[in-house]
Amino acid sequence: MSIHSMLFKTEQAVKILNINYQPIPFSKMKINYKDGNIERQLSLDPNNFFGFTFHDE
């Protein structure tokens, strides 16, 4: 199963709130978004074995 289908499996609107990153190779990126009324965060880390983590806030 892809990360897209696991993360954005919803019938509600998904709204990107902000994206935090640094233009440095192999740096982390955090995407804060709203899935309906629930705020969530996706962390992309190229140094992580899985490459990403996501959780509810």
Image: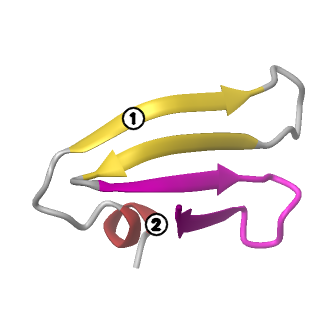
24, above or below 33, in the image = above
Q: CA distance from mark 2 to mark 1?
A: 16 Å
Where does the N terminus fall, quadrant-wise?
Answer: bottom left
Circle 2 residues within 10 Å: few <14, some 14–19, many ≥20: few
> In the image, which disc is placed on residue 16?
1
52, above or below 25, in the image = below
- Which residue appears at 58% of the width and 30% of the height? 19
Q: Does residue 8 appear left or right of residue 10 in this picture?
A: right
Prevailing SS of the magenta stretch = strand
**Callout 2 secondary element:** helix
> In the image, which disc is placed on residue 49?
none
> In the image, which disc is placed on residue 3?
2
Give the residues in magenta.
38-57
Residue nearest the viewer, comparing 40 with 26: 40
**Foreground label between 2 and 1:** 1
Circle 1 residues within 10 Å: few <14, some 14–19, many ≥20: some
Q: Does residue 53 appear left or right of residue 31 in this picture?
A: right
